[in-house]
Amino acid sequence: MSGADALAAHFWQGCALGELRYQRCRACGAAQFHPRRFCARCGGAPDWAVAQGLGTVYAATRVTRAPTPDFARLAPYDILLVDLDEGFRMMAHGAPGLRIGERVRLDFDRRGERALPRFERLGGRS
Ligand SMILES: [Zn+2]
């Protein structure tokens, strides 16, 4: 397994446990979501951390033409860019109809052995 694969595997293991894992730099404190061996800002060594999963919608897109047959079964679906309270931005599936600026909470959509991160409206399904 390459270093990048091992980092990605650590992230997906977290999802399976219901944890949103991200990295925080030991040197400058920057949060980064796509795991790397080094901090993208200063080159320092990042530690793993677990996010609470609360954030604000930065962008939302309705996907009607799925990129793969797997996702075609889900289409149409909404993809969100969310600013997590811990200070990083991530892309994930979202509940239909979420809008920019809405508060969201991360949940995991279990499909087989993989748990896909998915954002729900904070405060339940109202
Ligand atoms: Zn850093």
Image: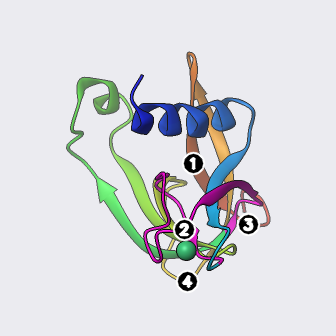
- Nearer to us of marks 1 and 2 is 2
* Residue 38 is inside the magenta segment: yes
Q: Could you tell me which secondary element the residue under label 4 belongs to?
A: loop
Which residue position holds label 1?
Answer: 118
Dot 2, how many residues are within 10 Å of its Cα: few (below 14), some (14-19), or many (20+)? some
Specify which label sits upstream in the sequence, 4 or 2: 2
Q: Would residue 98 be found to the left or right of residue 103 on screen?
A: left
Which of the four quarters of the rendered structure image does ligand 1 lie in?
bottom right
- Give above or below for 67 relative to 123: above
Occupied quadrant, residue 31: bottom right
Dot 3, how many residues are within 10 Å of its Cα: few (below 14), some (14-19), or many (20+)? some
Q: Could you tell me which secondary element the residue under label 1 belongs to?
A: strand
Q: Could you tell me which secondary element the residue under label 2 belongs to?
A: loop
Which residue position holds label 2?
Answer: 44
Q: In the depicted view, which residue is nearer to us: 16 or 23?
A: 23
Q: Are marks 4 and 1 in contact (CB under 8 Å)?
A: no
Q: Amino acid at mark 1?
A: Arg
Report the magenta residues as a range: 29-54
Q: CA distance from mark 4 to mark 1?
A: 17 Å
Q: Amino acid at mark 2?
A: Gly
Q: CA distance from mark 4 to mark 2?
A: 32 Å
Which residue position holds label 3?
Answer: 122
Q: In the depicted view, which residue is nearer to us: 90 or 126?
A: 90
Which residue position holds label 4?
Answer: 101
Residue plotted at (43% across, 69% down): 40
Q: Amino acid at mark 4?
A: Gly
Q: Would residue 45 be found to the left or right of residue 48 on screen?
A: left
Q: CA distance from mark 4 to mark 3?
A: 12 Å
Occupied quadrant, residue 69: top left
Q: Is residue 83 visible?
A: yes
Q: Identify the coloring.
A: rainbow
- Give above or below for 101 relative to 52: below
